[in-house]
Structure formats: structure tokens, C-alpha cells
Amino acid sequence: MQNQESKTPIKAMILAAGRGNRLRPITDTTPKPLVPLCGKPLIEYHIEKLAATGINEIVINHAWLGHKIEQALGDGSHWGVKLSYSPEPEGGLETAGGIINALELLGDKPFLVINGDVFCEMPFDGLIKKAQQLSDGKETTCLGHLMLVPSPEHNAKGDFGLDSEGLVQQQGEYTFAGLSVLHPKLFAGMEVDFIRLAPILRQAMQQGLISGELQEGLWSDIGTIERLQQTEAKVC
């Protein structure tokens, strides 16, 4: 339980406000993070893993069918964690907007951010260690740390690159896994609005403020029914 032994408790945010149009008709009545993978809602895999690594405060944003997410997960006591919710207006606030909207719940220390619609078998220990280093002031020139994976067929061009010093580059062959550590300072001066995260990250990359690491474990973006089925074939 690395995080429980740390000086600064680390919080996490699970992004769960997406509509999930490409997973329709499932998402007409079920919010995307509650779509079952091998009989278990996607978001529960993340909660279980966070709890197992010592994270005990988790913020979840929601928009589409958000009440169902709160009903299904409750206060988090089932997993031994505290769940807080950050509701958004219909249509959501996009990734960065949702994070900015939840900053009061997340505090002024670096936190983990996890996309609620991805599945991964890779551990979160590296992200927690990075968040702790940033919290303790051991790294003062980093505002974010991204987990990257080899690009799947549906994103063959990739999102970002990674240089020899571990800094993420704006273009490259790797795909952002939707797993990261972000510092609240990354959003300094920004008001709550419909804002995407990628442009903010790219601007910070220009200044060498975003580091990253490559992970090779099983990872899947559950963005379509076909990908859901392909992932189940590997996991179930």
C-alpha cells in the first residue's frame, strides 16, 4: 500500500461524463463507465485497482445518466474508498473542463486522472510514485505525466512521442492511454467551460513540462461495441 505510507495522500479522478454514442444502443440506457466488461462495469476495474494501491479518495465526474453512476457506486464504502461526484450540465464539459470543474474536490496537489472508458491490466504504482514526487516538490519542472501505449489499429498515427529524456513530444507514434498525473497548476487561471485537455497538454509540452512513460501491458479503449467484444475475448 504505497500511497498509505506516503507523506501526502494522493487523490484520483475518473472521467465518466462521456455520452458514448459509438456504444449505442447500450449507452442509451447505461452510462458508458457502467458498460459491463466480462460482467463487471468498466469503472469498477479502476476503483478496485486504485483501492488496492492505496488511493482512498476518488472524484468521479458525470453528465449523461449521471444519477445511475451514483446509484450504482454509492459512497465507495464497498471498496473501502470515499467517492465524491462532480456533476456537469447535459453534454458535459469535455476533459479539461470537467477537471477544472472538479478542482475544489481534488485539492492543490497533483492527482491521478483516469478515463472511465478504458481497460488496462498495467499497474498504477508508477503513476502514484510520480504524483508523490511532484507533491513532495522533488520535481519542479513537470506539470503532468502521461502513460503512453503502442498505438492500436484504430489510432495508427499515434498521439504523442517520447524523447530519450522522458519528455512527451507533441507528435509521435504512441497513443495516450487515458492514464495520467496532472498538477492543478496546469489549469491555472482557467475558468470552467467546455475545454479539451489535449491542447493544454500540447502547450505545456512546448515548454518541456510534460513527462511520460511507455507501458506494454494489455490496454483497450472501449469506444465501440466491436472493441468491447474484442477486449472481452482477451479478458473473460
Image (cartoon, helix red, strand yellow):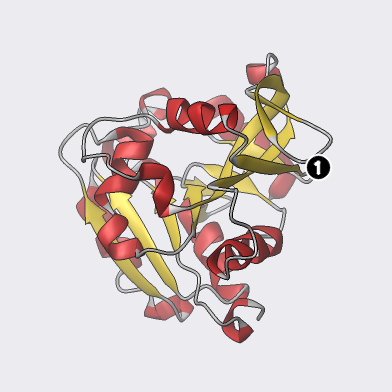
In the image: residue 51, left or right of residue 91:
right
> In the picture, residue 107 is in which quadrant?
bottom left
In this view, 10 is above or below 147: below
| Residue 181 in picture, x, y percent from top left | 55, 52
Residue extending furthest right? 164
In this view, 172 is above or below 36: above
Q: Residue at x 42, y 78 (%)?
A: 78
Q: Residue at x 61, y 74 (%)?
A: 52
Seen from the viewer's position, the closer of residues 151 and 186 is 186
> In the picture, residue 86 is in which quadrant?
bottom left
Seen from the viewer's position, the closer of residues 147 and 218 is 147
Seen from the viewer's position, the closer of residues 210 and 89 is 210
Question: How many tags in the picture?
Answer: 1
Q: Residue at x 31, y 30 (%)?
A: 195
| Residue 22 in picture, x, y percent from top left | 42, 23
Q: Which residue is mark 1?
A: 216
Q: Amino acid at mark 1?
A: Glu
Residue extending furthest left? 89
| Residue 80 in picture, x, y percent from top left | 46, 81
In the image: residue 51, left or right of residue 197:
right
The quarter of the rendered structure image containing the N terminus is: bottom right
| Residue 37 in picture, x, y percent from top left | 55, 48
Near mark 1 (Cα within 10 A), the count class, few <14, some 14-19 or many ≥20, is: few
Q: Which secondary structure lies at badge 1?
A: loop
Q: Is residue 223 visible?
A: no
